[in-house]
Image (cartoon, helix red, strand yellow):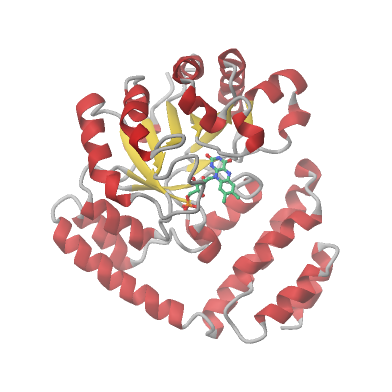
Amino acid sequence: MISNFWQQLPRPFFVLAPMEAVTDVVFRHVIAKAGAPDVWFSEFTNATGWVHAGQKAIGGRLIRTEDEQPIVAQIWGGEPGDMEQLAAHCRELGFHGIDINMGCPAKSAIKSGGSALIRKPEVAIAAIAAAKTSGLPVSVKTRLGYTSIGEWRGWLTTLLEQDIVNLTVHLRTKKEMSKVPAHFELIDDIIALRDKIAPETLLTINGDIQNRTHGLKLAAEHPGLNGIMIGRGVFQDPFCFVTSETSSRAAKLSATSATRVSAVAHTTETRREAVVDNFGSENTREELLRLLDYHLDLFDHWQPELSRPYETLKRFYKIYIRDFDGAKELRDQLMRTKNTDEAREILRKI
Ligand SMILES: Cc1cc2nc3c(=O)[nH]c(=O)nc-3n(C[C@H](O)[C@H](O)[C@H](O)COP(=O)(O)O)c2cc1C
């Protein structure tokens, strides 16, 4: 009997969003060092690719380590039979849950799956049933609709009727990509729909949430919300999941007093602003550089299994080298390096 970890999470719980070519085993360990979320997700992994071409189709997407607890494998596709097979494989690999991606707007994904499932509810329903045969808890990550916001009620109703453990809603439509602000104004209506149709299904929101403080504030403002998923916030601040003394106090308070939590969250926000103001100070810069050092070491450690070109590491440099005098020049130097040793050599001189 596999346990359903979702029921044991704190409220609100925090999730690191799945991000293709970003949240692999290397970067997840970097975030674990900076301050872990409550739930990890793998990058999305295509079921049909895995069934037909095996390991080489999915690269290192499903590599995980025992210390990543709990971790959900995110799968996608348009063939429920293939999803059944990949979900069973994920269970063998030791994942604790399966999430089905029904929100990816990329052209390559919507040929068969991702947000295309918003327009093929019968396939979405079959995919959920197929993933459930793994015995793992099944969740879904999706958007409000395909072309118009008005689709949200019908589409989310269909999903909530499938007895899933968690529904993550990226608060935009497929058409909106990430070009407009997330529709926070719909949160309470979505909570009310969940309460009506599937009160046991957890509800997680996603889109434009910057950090733990921001997430706590939203949870306090919208009672009934269970989880907060943060993606690009980690690029602005890899420490975005860190629990400060004040924010953990806010979490404890959240069950009893939404208004007071808002005030506490506000205090934390003010503190964080102070930290951000100080971003150029030696300490914060020092912490980021140590994290970058760790990232380089992990990249080398996993390289034999992941076989990802050194070039793919460069997109991360702007996370660590920023907001201080000379940061741009330093980044330019790093962009000209050809391997981690050359990068370390430059960093040693700082
Ligand atoms: C580089 C990148 C890769 C992404 N890959 C995935 C993915 O594999 N699966 C998925 O469900 N969403 C993926 N997303 C979407 C994010 O999970 C998230 O829904 C989106 O970025 C909005 O949240 P945010 O504002 O907190 O970043 C990706 C986003 C980015 C920026």
Instruction: Give the left or right position of residue 69, taking residue 212 as reference.
Output: right
Q: Residue at x 64, y 73 (%)?
A: 321
**How many dots with numbers?**
0
Determine which quarter of the picture holds residue 55.
top right
Determine which quarter of the picture holds residue 47.
top right
Whether residue 47 can be seen here: yes
Q: Residue at x 79, y 57 (%)?
A: 311
Q: Position of residue 21 (x, y in %)?
A: 66, 47
Q: Residue at x 31, y 70 (%)?
A: 268
Q: Residue at x 83, y 66 (%)?
A: 341
Q: Position of residue 231 (x, y in %)?
A: 50, 52
Q: Which is nearer the eye, 175 or 199?
A: 175
Q: Position of residue 193 (x, y in %)?
A: 24, 32
Query: Which quarter of the rendering shows the N terminus?
Result: top left
Whether residue 94 can be seen here: no
Q: Which is nearer the eye, 314 or 67?
A: 314
Q: Which is nearer the eye, 219 or 250?
A: 219
Q: Position of residue 172 (x, y in %)?
A: 42, 44
Determine which quarter of the picture holds residue 323.
bottom right
Q: Which is nearer the eye, 332 or 31?
A: 332
Query: Which quarter of the rendering shows the C terminus?
Result: bottom right
Instruction: Give the left or right position of residue 274, taking residue 187 as reference.
Output: right
